[in-house]
C-alpha cells in the first residue's frame, strides 16, 4: 500500500490550499460560523468552477472522473479551514446516491446540474433526530392516482438551507423503503434552522407534498441498499475533510504551545500540555491512516465496506476529541468565537452524528467482519 501523493494529487492539494487561504481566511470564517452563515452562494460557485463538485462522477454525467484519493486531498484542505457549504453533501453524497441508484435518465437529468453547482441536492434521511438506520425512517409515501404524496419530518438535515432539492427516504404503504427526489419549492416543503451548539443543521418538513412517479430513485424497496453503496464511497471523503480539520487543530495548537509563555517559559515545556499534544497527534494519525487506507482500497477496486465504517468512526471521534484536547491547551482564549478553534468545535459536534455516530459505525463494521446470520 503506497499512500504517497502523485504529481496530480500534489497539484490538487496546492490549488485547494491556495483557495482556502484566499477565500476562507480565519478572520472571515470565524464570523461565518459565529453567525451560522455557512451557506455562501458565491463561495460555493467558486468551488464549482474549480470542478470540486462531482469529482468522483464520470465525465459523461458532468463530473471529473477523479480517483477517490484525488477527491480526498481536496477535501482535506477544505477541512483545514473548515470551509462550510454543501460541497460534500451535494457534490459527493447526493451525487453518488443518484449514480448508484438512479436510472440512466435520472443520471443525465440530475448529475450535470449538481456537478456544475446549478442544483444543490441534499439527502434528508432520518426522522428520529440523529439516530441512524433504516428503522428511523418514518416518513410515509402514499400512492395516489397520479403519483405519490409524501408526509414526514426530517430532523438534523445537514446543509438543508442551500438545497434546491432533497433526496428523501420514506416508506411506502407496504413498508418498503424508497428514495424520492423532492423539489424545495414544492408546496408543503418547509425548512427550519436548528438552534444550539451546532451549525448547518435544519428540520425539513414535508406536508402533503406531491411526488411524481419519475422522481422515485431506483426500485421500490431498494432505498437503504442504494444508500449503503453510496456511503461506502462517500464516507471516506468526508473523513478526509475531518483529517484536514484535525491537522489544522494540531498545527495551531502546537504553535501556541511554543509561543505562549507562562512562569517564564513556553507552556509546551509543561508535562500536562505535552500530554494533550500527544493525544492530538494520536487521534490525527489514527484518522489519517485509516481514512487513506480505505481510499486506497476503493481506488484499487477492493471491497471496503467495513473499512469505510471504521474510518467514519475513527475520524468522527478524532475530530471531536482533537477539539477537546486543544481547548484544554488554549483554555479561555479558545472559547472566544473569534478564535478558529470555536468554528471547529461547533462543526465537530455536528459532524460527529452526521450519517451515523461512531458507535453505529463500529457496530456496522463488526457486523460485516463477523456476520452472525441474524437479521
Image: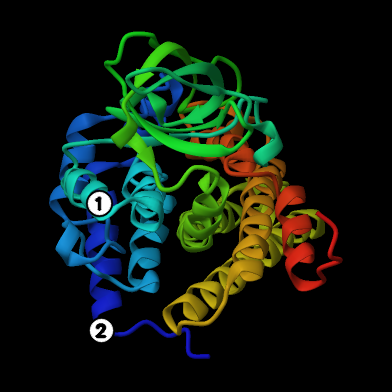
**Residue at the spot 72% in from the left edge and 42% down from the top edge:** 328
Residue 73 left/right relative to 105: right
- The relative height of residue 20 versus residue 306 in the rendered view (above or below) is above
**Residue at the spot 84% in from the left edge and 65% down from the top edge:** 373
**Residue at the spot 54% in from the left edge and 17% down from the top edge:** 152
Q: Where in the figure is residue 342, as x and y percent of width and height?
A: 54, 33
Residue 335 left/right relative to 65: right
Q: Which residue is mark 2?
A: 7
The image's mark for residue 336 is none
How many neighbours does mark 2 have within 10 angstroms: few (below 14), some (14-19), or many (20 or more)? few
Residue 244 can be seen in this image: no
Residue 371's quadrant in the figure?
bottom right
Q: Residue furthest front?
A: 145
Q: Nearer the viewer, residue 316 or 65?
A: 65
**Residue at the spot 53% in from the left edge and 82% down from the top edge:** 302
Q: Nearer the viewer, residue 323 or 136?
A: 136
Q: Nearer the viewer, residue 240 or 231?
A: 231
The image's mark for residue 107 is 1
Q: Where in the figure is residue 326, as x and y percent of width and height?
A: 65, 47
Amino acid at each position: 500500500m503506497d499512500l504517497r501523493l502523485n504529481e496530480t494529487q500534489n497539484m490538487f492539494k496546492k490549488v485547494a490550499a491556495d483557495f482556502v487561504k484566499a477565500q476562507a481566511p480565519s478572520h472571515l470564517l470565524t464570523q461565518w460560523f459565529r453567525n451560522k452563515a455557512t451557506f455562501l452562494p458565491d463561495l460555493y460557485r467558486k468551488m464549482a468552477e474549480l470542478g470540486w463538485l462531482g469529482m468522483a462522477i464520470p465525465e459523461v454525467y458532468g463530473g471529473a472522473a477523479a480517483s477517490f484519493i484525488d477527491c480526498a486531498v481536496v477535501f482535506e484542505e477544505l477541512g483545514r479551514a473548515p470551509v462550510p457549504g454543501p460541497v460534500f453533501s451535494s457534490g459527493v453524497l447526493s451525487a453518488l446516491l443518484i449514480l448508484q441508484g438512479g436510472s440512466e435518465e435520472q443520471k443525465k437529468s440530475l448529475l450535470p446540474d449538481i456537478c456544475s453547482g446549478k442544483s444543490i441536492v441534499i439527502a434528508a434521511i432520518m426522522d428520529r433526530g440523529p439516530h441512524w438506520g433504516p428503522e428511523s425512517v418514518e416518513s410515509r409515501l402514499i400512492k395516489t392516482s397520479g403519483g405519490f404524496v409524501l408526509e414526514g419530518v426530517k430532523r438534523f438535515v445537514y446543509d438543508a438551507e442551500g438545497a434546491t432539492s432533497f433526496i428523501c427516504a420514506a416508506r411506502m404503504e407496504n413498508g418498503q423503503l424508497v428514495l424520492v427526489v423532492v423539489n424545495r419549492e414544492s408546496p408543503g416543503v418547509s425548512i427550519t434552522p436548528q438552534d444550539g451548539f451546532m451549525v448547518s443543521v435544519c428540520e425539513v418538513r414535508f406536508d402533503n407534498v406531491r411526488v411524481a412517479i419519475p422522481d422515485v430513485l431506483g426500485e421500490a424497496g431498494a432505498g437503504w441498499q442504494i444508500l449503503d453503496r453510496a456511503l461506502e464511497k462517500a464516507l471516506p471523503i468526508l473523513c478526509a475533510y475531518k483529517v484536514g480539520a484535525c491537522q489544522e487543530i494540531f498545527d495551531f495548537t502546537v504553535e501556541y504551545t511554543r509561543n505562549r509563555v507562562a512562569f517564564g517559559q513556553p507552556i509546551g515545556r509543561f508535562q500536562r500540555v505535552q500530554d494533550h499534544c500527544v493525544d492530538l497527534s494520536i487521534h490525527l494519525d489514527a484518522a489519517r491512516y485509516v481514512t487513506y487506507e480505505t481510499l486506497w482500497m476503493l481506488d484499487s477496486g477492493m471491497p471496503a465496506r467495513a473499512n469505510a465504517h471504521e474510518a467514519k468512526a475513527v475520524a468522527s471521534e478524532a475530530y471531536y476529541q482533537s477539539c477537546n484536547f486543544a481547548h484544554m491547551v488554549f483554555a479561555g482564549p479558545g472559547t472566544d468565537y473569534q478564535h478558529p478553534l470555536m468554528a471547529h468545535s461547533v462543526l465537530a459536534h455536528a459532524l460527529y452524528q452526521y450519517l451515523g455516530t461512531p458507535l453505529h459505525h463500529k457496530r456496522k463494521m463488526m457486523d460485516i467482519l463477523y456476520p452472525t446470520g441474524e437479521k
